Image (tube, rainbow, N blue to C red):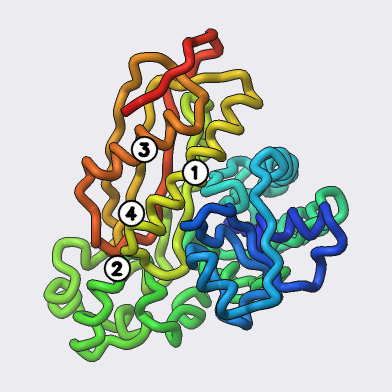
Amino acid sequence: MLVHFDLDAFYASVAQRDDPSLRGVPLAISGSSRRAVVLTASYEARPFGVRSAMPLYRARELCPQLVVVPPNFTAYRATSERVFAIFEDGARAVEGLSLDEAFCDPHGADGERASLDEAVAFAQRVRARVRAEVGLTVSAGVASGKMVAKIACDANKPDGLTIVPPGTEADFLAPMPVGRLWGIGPKTQPRIEAAGIRTIGDVAALDDARAFALFGRGWTFYRDLARGIDDRDVDPSRERKSISTEETFEYDERDEQRILALLRIQADELAHDLQARHLRGATVGVKIKRADHTITGRQTSLAVATNDADAIHDAAVWCWQRAGMAGVPIRLLGTRVASLTDEEARELRLF
């Protein structure tokens, strides 16, 4: 059994933990520029319609009493490292998806993959330790495969634990909208629904010929997922050859100004991280996941390794422009700095 963990409203929760006056109030983490976007909204702000990647001016319109706090990437990194140390205590493998989210493959009594009871006990122990030692809440999903564990985690937030016993995966998934199935994006979903497929259970019930007609060569992948069959392992490879940050949009995003604003935020975060580690990078790249889950990446090599936020930002924007994705709805955007060195380098200004 696997466990998916996701810290609740991570950036906002860190701010509320560190400043008690922010607890219980609608809160947004955002920069202060004219084109600032909301990085994270607290659960108190979400009933007003405030959400991640929303322009800050729009968030203020929806919630005039909104409290806005600038991001503190140093605190986020430090907190994430503490939480991941807890994840790794008792796990055979940990696959970090972002600062606040990970898949874990817990140890069983025999050193192999954990049983259901062992995985639940691991999830409960981790949740209690994160609350007691870090001061945050983390939701969890326990299931036999990655997709079901992730959906289970999302189903009971914040501060929830959802358990899907082996053999019940298909029943758990069946009533959910077909758009919850991994790989079904906004472009694919209307076509699938036009064929009368409304739920994940409808996909699971497809015969071979109809599944092929709807999904093409990937039909077995989609139908297996819909039936709860997912044998992908937790990938523990987290070797520090690069540093990266990425943001999954709550809703697919096509507004280029919001995307460029997020690249600015990510460049600032990476620069803070590099400076804290006394590192510089000579390669900058962007990762773009479209609504249909296809991934595009572009990268560029710098003349001199840097940890300057402006240099990283300019290189990332250039990579974004090279990708030719303007106007295309995307679900995830990431920036990466690689070719790391701890050697001193001259100040670099690009473009």
Distance in Å between CA atoms under marks 1 and 3: 9 Å
Horizontal and vertical percent position of residue 85:
72, 39
Image quarter hosting the N terminus: bottom right
Report crowding for label 3: few under 14, some 14 to 19, many 20 or more residues within 10 A (C-alpha). Answer: many
Where is residue 267? Give x, y as percent.
48, 38
Q: Is mark 3 on a helix, strand or loop?
A: helix
Q: Which amino acid does label 1 sit on?
A: Gln
Looking at the figure, which quarter contains the C terminus?
A: top left
Residue receiving disc 4: 289
Neighbour class for label 1 at 10 Å: few (<14), some, many (≥20)? many
Circle 2 residue: 222
Q: Which of marks 1 and 4 is nearer the N terminus?
A: 1
Give the number of the disc on residue 332.
none
**Which mark lies nearer to you, 2 or 4?**
4
Neighbours of disc 4 within 10 Å: few (<14), some (14-19), many (20+): some
Circle nearer the N terminus (1, 3): 1
- Residue 1 visible (yes or no): no
Q: Which amino acid does label 2 sit on?
A: Tyr
Q: Name the residue under label 1.
A: 266
Where is residue 205? Give x, y as percent.
30, 83
Gap in angstroms between the C-alphas marked 2 and 1: 33 Å
Q: Which of marks 2 and 3 is in front?
A: 3
Q: State the residue position of label 3.
A: 316
Q: What residue type is labelled 3?
A: Ala
**What residue is drawn where x is 15% and y is 62%?**
217
